[in-house]
Structures are given as C-alpha cells and as structure tokens.
Amino acid sequence: MNRRLYATALLLMLLCGCKQTYLTLHFQEEVGDPQQAEVASYFVETITQMATTIGIAADDIGLEMDRKDDKTLHISLDSSVSEPQRQRLRALLDEIVEARAAVTFDAVLEIAPQTGKYTSPDYRKRAMALPRHFSLALEPVQYASVMFQYSMQELISGKLSATGTPNEALCQYQASIRAPGMLFSQMGSKAGSGTGDYNVYLEWKGDKHEPEQYLFGNITFANPTLNQMLFDNRIQLSVIKTSWGSRDNRRADRIGFSVGGLGLQYHEDGEISALQHIGLMGRCTGMAMDLGRPFTFYIGRSMDRLLSVELASPNA
C-alpha cells in the first residue's frame, strides 16, 4: 500500500471510529478455546475492567485470539481512545510482566548440626564438618501433585495397597532445584518460627545404605512473601527425590510447596483414578491461586501468566 492509499485508509478509520489492533499479549497458557477461537470470559472481563478504570469505554476496546497461537491475544482500540490512555493501558500490562520477571523462588538453607540426633559420635563429627549455608537455586513451581499422608506402620503393613484406603491428602506444587541438588534427603517445615528457633528439620544420609541422621535448620527465601506464608503456615515445605535408583547419595532435586489439604481421600497405594485426579487438581489450583503471588505467576488462569506485551504494527 503506497503512502497516499495508507493515509486515505487511516483517515477513513478515524472518521468511522473503527477499532485497530494496538497491543499483542503473549501468555504462558492458552487464552481461550482454540477450536472456537474465542477468548476466555476471564480475560475479556479483566482487561475490559482495566481499561475502564483509566477512562476507556468498554465499547472502545476489543479482544481477539490469535488465529495461529492460542496463547496470544490482540487488543484493539477505537480511534477515539487518546494517546495518554493508550500509554497508561500498556503501562498497566507492562507492570505485570516486570513483576513476573522479578519473581524468584531461590532460598538459603542454614543448618544447625549441633541440634542433630545422630546414631554415633562419628556421624556427629561428620555433620559438624558440613557447610553451614547452602544456596538453593530453584526453578519456578511447575509440577503439581496430590500427596497422601500416612504412617510408617501403614507402609510396612501393606495397608496402603488395599483397595479403597483413606488417608489425608494435600496439594503440592514442586520447584526443581538446580544442580547439584540438595544434600538432604527429607525436609519438613514448622510455622511461626521466631528468633532463635528453627523452621525446618532435615534428614541427612551419607549414602542410601547408611542410617538416617536428623538435624534442624532455617530456610529463608529471597521472596519475603514466601517467608511470611511459611511463618503463617499457609504453605508447608518438603523435599522430593525424583530419581531414587540413580542417586546413591539420595539427594533431593525438588522442593515441594504444600498449599492446602484435601481431607480424607480414597486411594490404592497412593494412586487415584484419572477422574478423581482432575477434580482434586481443580481444587488445588484454586488453593494456589488464593495464595496469590508468586504462585499465580505459574498456576491457574490469571493476568499474572502474561509473558510479554508488544505494540502492534501500524497496518495490523
């Protein structure tokens, strides 16, 4: 299109009050139904509300899912929307992207080997020689699981393999620990720990053939919100080993964030049906979203799943 035709088209658009694509948003998850090419009502309502709070009329904004990418949507604005309003809308969306980019699950674990319970003086000596601080570089939460709580007696007796076994279940989201993983094979957390107290207990083994040794420590997240959630008992921590057979030292390679309980659930040796899993994971998603950030950056359907914002080309 030459300049004269482009100018004519632009003038006609301004005169008719047509909408033109202004921004393109890229999300981590799909923004609607790809088969129907329909944007989810959540995004329509939320983005429209964002626009109306800065003076853009609901009728002056439109949303459309990208035809080739169901994780992308386009925002179109009426020609009557002023430039300051356009810039403010983009700024609101950019704030979400910047907050997401700044989030971290990294933590520092400080152990107190003098608090340990050891099976021999030699183990105590070895524990006292361990480093006191461990930097834990964590990926964002990614893996979701329904976990069951049961006693060692239930495990040994074979009761868990019985059909229709009821146990307390909980929702857990897991974050991978970057190599070399974690020195400890088990971890549990305690809420409300104050000055001079410890907020985690740890199981340590030199290798998988040695007896378990136990000690206490403190974990501190770089994100203060996570520290407060732990203190308030809104989350509980544990560690997970995803490759038991190939790790002689039984190092954990994920940290689990338990976000809520599901009550008594029936299972068979920790396994549940596909239909049961779908229902429970829906409840887990709701619990994680109720916690807010940083979990909403990676779980559920929300504006926090926004990855990037692009200004549309003039002829879009």
Image (cartoon, helix red, strand yellow):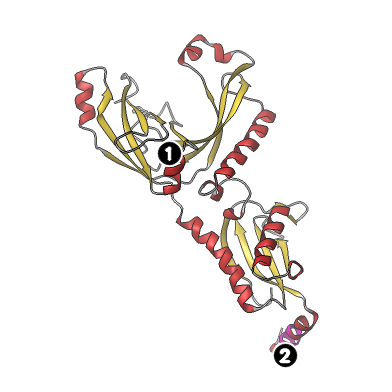
Looking at the picture, tell me which residue is in the foreground, 146 or 49. Answer: 49
Residue type for callout 2? Arg
Tell me the crowding category of disc 1: few under 14, some 14 to 19, or many 20 or more residues within 10 angstroms, Cα based: some
In the image, is residue 54 above or below residue 128?
below
Is residue 213 or residue 194 the one in the foreground? Answer: 194
Quadrant in which the N terminus appears: bottom right
* Residue 215 percent across, percent down from the top left: 30, 27
Label at residue 231: 1
In magenta stretch: residue 219: no
Name the side, left or right, on which 194 lies relative to 57.
Answer: left
Identify the residue under disc 2. Answer: 4
- Foreground: disc 1 or disc 2: 1
Asked whether the viewer can see residue 40, the reply is no
Q: Classify 166 as above or below 136.
A: above
Instruction: Determine the residue positioned at 80% across, 80% down.
Output: 16
Where is residue 190? Give x, y as percent: 41, 31
Q: Residue at x 68, y 66 (%)?
A: 52
Segment tinted magenta in the rendering: 5-10
Look at the image and say whether residue 6 sits in the magenta stretch. yes
Q: Is mark 2 on a helix, strand or loop?
A: helix
Q: Nearer the viewer, residue 46 or 208?
A: 46
Q: Residue at x 42, y 34 (%)?
A: 191
Give the mark nearer the N terminus: 1 vs 2.
Answer: 2
**Number of dots carrying numbers:** 2
